[in-house]
Image: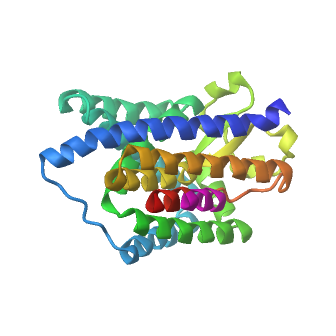
Amino acid sequence: MKSKLSPFLWGGLVMVLALALTFYVAARGQVFFEENQIVSPDISLGPIIAYFFGVVVVLALVLFFIPLRWLRLIFRALFALMFGYGVFIVTGLTWPVVVAGPLAVIAGIVWLFWARIWLHDLLLLVALSGLGSVIGFLFSPLTFMIFMLIIAVYDVIAVRFGFMVWMADKMSESDTLPAFIFPRQIRDWRMGLRSVRFGDLRKKESDKREYSILGGGDIGIPLMLAVSVFFKAGLGSAALVGVFALVGLMGAFLIQLLWLKDKPVPALPPIAFASLIGFLITELA
């Protein structure tokens, strides 16, 4: 039972830490935007949907056609840039650029050549918080809530027909994975990212799996919604939406634990549904 609850506890902890860091970065960003008289462009729903599914199509084509040896180079470079940029956003709003810049470069290089599971999870958390704080500013809460519900439907379809599983498997083969990895044994947190293979994980029963995986989007997308609410309605409303997103995430873990054992579970639908409840409460309050 303890091993089965491990992903539940780690996932909840990651969501809480990500929300706390994101709200801190968003608050610092709010000061920066106000000082520089920057206003949200309130991007409409059409462009964000087109961009998202365009990225999905391009990513699928890249994974299908490009040989594995090239995928490793391309994706590892992209992940190093993403982690470095996330660190730069988080630290750049607090410290001078001459400090934040080198820290971002060091973070990307260290991950590139020394990608341990604990480091990967930490940098992914920082990157999602930093990027979420910027992206959430670009949309109104209603627009992003609708987008989140659409992506939740896509998540169900993609998992049901194996598309999401196929993408995760291919990306893990390239020694990259846009997901949090939760080992069951403390000593395994020091393992290299190359030891994680999503395809091998699926072949094992849940009781025999050495680690579990939580998609980065299942954390990053609700963070963006919370940030969007933060810039419109303040910290209290954003925190309420974040709490409901956490409840949805816990619900996804319970669904996997009690009903869909040994099967991949699309976590975004319960997260989106719970977030919608929180969002409606903030709108009606």
Q: Quadrant of residue 5?
A: top right
Classify 111 as above or below 136.
above
Quadrant where the image shows the N terminus: top right
Q: Position of residue 173 (x, y in %)?
A: 63, 50
Classify 1 as above or below 62.
above
Decide whether the magenta segment is chiefly helix, strand or loop. helix
At 45% across and 68% down in the image, what residue appears?
52
**Magenta stretch contains residue 100:** no
Residue extent of the magenta highlight: 268-277
Q: Position of residue 30 (x, y in %)?
A: 25, 45
At 63% across and 56% down in the image, what residue appears?
168
Q: Is residue 177 visible?
A: no
Q: Position of residue 82 (x, y in %)?
A: 39, 46
Nearer-the-camera pick, 47 or 34 = 34
At 86% across and 39% down in the image, what residue appears?
207
Nearer-the-camera pick, 236 or 166 = 236
For residue 233, side relative to residue 117 (left or right) = left
